[in-house]
């Protein structure tokens, strides 16, 4: 009887964890709208325009546009590989232990920032959360095919 109850409990827990899979539509989009849209929304410049006149857009408190799923994953997989990870990281993955420059905007308290960071990290994939770039630059290595294959970013 105990084995049957244990099997039922394990099955129930497994089905709950599958149901709690982090997706863009259900989890990331609402969080993004609350914490990121003001600077990275539809009125923000696309990446190429932002790069051309970075100082102008920074003065306007605008970053690169990320208001769609495809715009957002541009900064995860390719071509600006790892940008989201470098910007949102809590510092645990950096050599100096310093968080990324956008980590502070994930919440008004450290607890809220940690919770929202964990959500983004789970969406990208725990093992896929890397600060690598498409091509190595300075002390930041290039991402490998195997590392790219670990990226989840479910819609």
Image: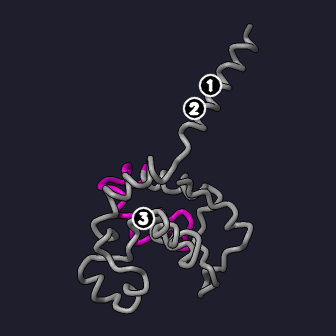
Q: Is residue 79 above or below residue 19?
A: below
Cβ–Cβ under 8 Å for marks 3 and 2: no
Residue underneath mark 1: 12
Residue underneath mark 2: 16
Which numbered circle lies on residue 68?
3
Residue 153, how many percent across, how many down?
A: 56, 58
Cβ–Cβ under 8 Å for marks 1 and 3: no
Q: Residues within 10 Å of mark 3 (few under 14, many from 20)?
A: few
Q: In what element is the residue under mark 3?
A: loop
Figure quadrant of residue 53 = bottom left
Point 24% across, 83% down: residue: 59
On the question of residue 141 being in view, the answer is yes
Q: How many marks?
A: 3
Residue 138, how many percent across, how many down?
A: 59, 87
Q: In what element is the residue under mark 1?
A: helix
Cβ–Cβ under 8 Å for marks 2 and 1: yes
Residue 54, how many percent across, how many down?
A: 35, 87
136 with respect to 47 (left or right): right
In primary-sequence order, the first of circles 3 and 2 is 2
142 with respect to 87 (left or right): right
105 with respect to 128 (left or right): left
Which numbered circle lies on residue 63?
none
Q: CA distance from mark 2 to mark 1?
A: 6 Å
The magenta span reads: 90-115
Any magenta on residue 154?
Answer: no
5 with respect to 69 (left or right): right
Image quadrant holding the N terminus, namely top right
Figure quadrant of residue 45 = bottom left
Q: CA distance from mark 1 to mark 3?
A: 34 Å
């Amino acid at each position: 009887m105990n084995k049957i109850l244990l099997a039922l409990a394990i099955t129930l827990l497994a089905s709950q964890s599958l149901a709690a899979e982090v997706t863009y539509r259900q989890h990331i989009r609402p969080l993004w709208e609350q914490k990121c849209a003001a600077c990275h929304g539809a009125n923000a410049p696309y990446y190429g325009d932002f790069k051309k006149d970075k100082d102008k857009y920074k003065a306007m408190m605008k970053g690169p546009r990320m208001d769609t799923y495809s715009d957002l994953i541009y900064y995860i997989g390719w071509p600006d590989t790892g940008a989201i990870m470098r910007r949102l990281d809590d510092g645990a993955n950096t050599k100096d232990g310093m968080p990324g420059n956008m980590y502070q905007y994930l919440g008004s308290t450290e607890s809220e920032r940690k919770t929202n960071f964990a959500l983004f990290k789970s969406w990208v994939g725990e093992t896929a959360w890397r600060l690598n770039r498409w091509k190595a630059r300075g002390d930041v290595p290039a991402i490998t095919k195997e590392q790219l294959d670990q990226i989840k970013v479910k819609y």
